Amino acid sequence: MSRMMEEIREQPEALRRTFEAERGHAAEFKKFAAGRDFRLIVLVARGTSDNAALFGRYLLEIATGIPVSLCAPSVHTLYNARLDFRRALVIGISQSGAGTDINMVLRNARKQGAFTVAITNEAKSEMARLTDETFLARAGKQRSVAATKTYTCQLMLLYLMAFALGNQIELGEVNKIPGHVSQALKLAAEIREIVQRYRYMRQCAVVARGLNYANAFELALKLMETCYVVAERFSSADFLHGPIAMIERDFPVILFAPPGKAFVGQRLLLRKLAGLRAETIAITSTDVRLPEATRMIRIHGKIKEIYSAIPYIVPGQIFAAQLAEVKGLDPDRPRSLKIVTQTV
Amino acid sequence: MSRMMEEIREQPEALRRTFEAERGHAAEFKKFAAGRDFRLIVLVARGTSDNAALFGRYLLEIATGIPVSLCAPSVHTLYNARLDFRRALVIGISQSGAGTDINMVLRNARKQGAFTVAITNEAKSEMARLTDETFLARAGKQRSVAATKTYTCQLMLLYLMAFALGNQIELGEVNKIPGHVSQALKLAAEIREIVQRYRYMRQCAVVARGLNYANAFELALKLMETCYVVAERFSSADFLHGPIAMIERDFPVILFAPPGKAFVGQRLLLRKLAGLRAETIAITSTDVRLPEATRMIRIHGKIKEIYSAIPYIVPGQIFAAQLAEVKGLDPDRPRSLKIVTQTV
C-alpha cells in the first residue's frame, strides 16, 4: 500500500487526536476573542494548505460573520505593502510551519497590528514560534509527498476557530466528523473498481460550490500531483460563465454534490453536462438521486452540509491515490516535488 | 475580422474615453473617501469581471494599504451569512450590471453597513441603480461573447479607485496606458505567425504572479471560451507547490513576465520548465532577455510594473482570438455561452 493510501486511512484517528487535544484550547480562545472584537480574518497559506484556507474562507464567514480575506503573499513579500491590520486576526496555515514567504507575511502582519495564529503540524516550527498562538494539528508525521491527513486536520482546526469566533459551530457535531470519515473510507473497494474506467483520462474538471468549493481545488491538486491529470477546478457558478464552452462529449467532470444549500445548483449543472454528453462523476450521498451522473460515489450516513467538507474529500483522496496506481504511477514519488517547497 | 478582434482593437479608444470621463469623478471620490476611513474593500464579481476583481485585489492592497477580500457570492446567496460590513467599501464589477447574484450581494452589503460602488459598462443597469456610486466604463457596447475591452476598461476604473483610496497611483502614468495598448496591438501580425504552432494544442498552463496574476486567469478563460483549450491558471509560487508535477516534455506553459518585482521568479520558473523540456511562451518586454523561452511575445516601450496589467493582457487576447481562427473555430460563437449568464 502506498504511503499516501496509508495516510488517508489514518485520518479518523488523526482527526480525533486533533479535536481532543485542541478543543479545550479553542474554548479558551473563544473567551479571549470575545474581548478582542476582530473585524477581519486573513488566511495565509500555499499549496494544499491554501486549499484548507479556501475552506476556512467560507466556513469562517458563514459561521462568524467576520469578513475573511485570503492573503496574496506577494503583496507583502514582493511589493512590501503595509496593510492596515488593526483588529485583524491573521491565521497562517502550513503543514511544516517552515514556508519562508508565509512566515514573512505573518511577521509583517504582527508588526502591522494583527493578532497572529498558526495552524501547523509542527510544534517546533518557525511559524509556531513567531505567532501569538498555535493550534496544533496532530496528524502525525507526514511522509507522503501528497498531503491528505494534514489537509483534513487543518480543516478540523478551522472548525475549532469557527467555534471560537462565532456561535454556529457545535462541538458535538464536529466530534462526529471522524466517524463520517471512517464511513467514507469504506468506499475504497468500490472506488478501486471505478478508477479503472479513467486509466486513460488525461484531463478533467472538478466542480463544487460553497462549503465544498475548496475540495474541488484539493482533489484537482491531488490529480495533478499524483496522476499528472490536467485537472481544472471551478465553482459551478463560474463554470457557467465561460469554461463550460470547452466541455464536449466524453469530457470528464467530477462534481462534489453533498445534500445542502449548494446541491440544487450542482444537480442543474449535472443535467446540463449530461445534455452535452460529458462524463460525470458525482461524489454525493446515498440519500439523494442523481440519475444523470455517469458514475456516483455515495457516502452513507446523514451529514449536515456545514460538516461535510472533511468526509467528502476522502473519496477524492482515494480516487487520486488509486488512479495513480492504475496508471502505473507511484503516488509517493511525484515528479519534480518535495514535501516542503520554498518560495518568496 | 471577428467581433472579438474588432473589440480588442477598440481598446486604446475605449480606455481613453473611460479615463477622461471618470478621472474627475475619481478626484471627487478621493475627497469623500478621505472622510470615511474605509478599513476593508470587498470586490464582488463573476467570470471575466472576477478576473478584473482579482487584479483589483492586488492593486488596491499595494496602492492603498487597505485589506481587500474577494467576495464568495454563495456565502450571501446560498448561506445567507450576515457579515460585519461597517467601514467596508464593497465594489461590484459587472459588464452588464445585470448579474442576479452579484446584485443580491451588493443589496445585502448595503443593508449591513457597507458603502457600495458599481463598476459597470451599463449606466442604466440594476447594479448602477442599487449602489451608492457608479464608475462607468465607456467600452462601448460589448457585442463579442468573449469580453476584452470591458475587462481592460474595468481595470482602468480600478486604477482610478486605487488613485482615490491611496497615494501611489499617478494619473499621469495611468494616462499613458492607452498608448501602451496601441504599442501592444502592433504585435498582432507577429502573433498570427506564432499561433500556427499551437494549432493542435489541447491543454496548457498560464502562469503569472502579483500584479499580472489576474491576467493568467483572464488569458486562460479566453483560451477555454474561444479555443476550447483546457487551460490551467496558476501563480508561479503555487505552481511549484504541486502542479509542476504534471509538466512533461512538450507541455505548453504561457508565462506573463513583465519587468518588475515578479520578474525574477518568472525567469527562475522558465528555467525550471526549460529543464523539463516544456514548451514555454513568454509575454514579456523588449527590454529583457529570456533565452530559455521557446517563443517570446515582446512589448515595446518602458512600462512600470504597476501599470503593466492592461497592456500585457492585450497580446494574450490577440493570441486567443487568432488561435481560435487557426483552429477553425469562430471566437464570436463559443459553444454553450451567452454574453450575460445568470447564476444564484
Image (cartoon, coloured by chain):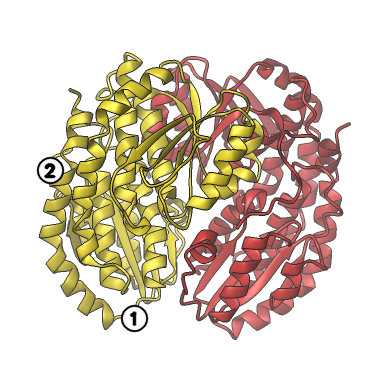
Chain colours: A yellow, B red
Residue name at image x 25 percent, y 71 percent: A164
Residue at 21%, 65% in the rendered image: A171
Please give left or right for residue A117 compared with residue A277 in the image. Answer: left
User: Quadrant of the image for the C terminus of chain A?
Assistant: top left
User: Is A100 drawn above or below residue B102 in the view shown?
Assistant: above
> Sequence order check: which comes first, mark 2 or mark 1?
1
The subunit carrying tag 1 is A
Name the subunit of mark 2.
A
Question: Residue B112, percent across and down?
Answer: 53, 79
Residue at the far bottom: name it: B35
Q: Badge 1 is on which residue?
A: A37
| Image quadrant where residue B336 sits | top right
Where does residue A66 sit, x and y in percent of width and height? 41, 72
What is the x, y in percent for residue A81?
46, 61
Amino acid found under the numbered disc labelled 1: Asp
In-front residue for pair A245/B53 = A245
Q: Estimate the spatial distance between the alpha carbons at disc 2 and disc 1, rounded to whole Å.
A: 34 Å
Q: Nearer the viewer, residue A183 or A15?
A: A183
Circle 2: residue type: Gly
Residue A140 shows which numbered tag?
Answer: 2
Instruction: Please tell me which residue is depicted at 18% across the width and 38% down the height of the picture.
Output: A142
Q: Is residue B308 visible?
A: no
Indicate the position of residue B54 as horizontal and vertical percent values: 57, 53
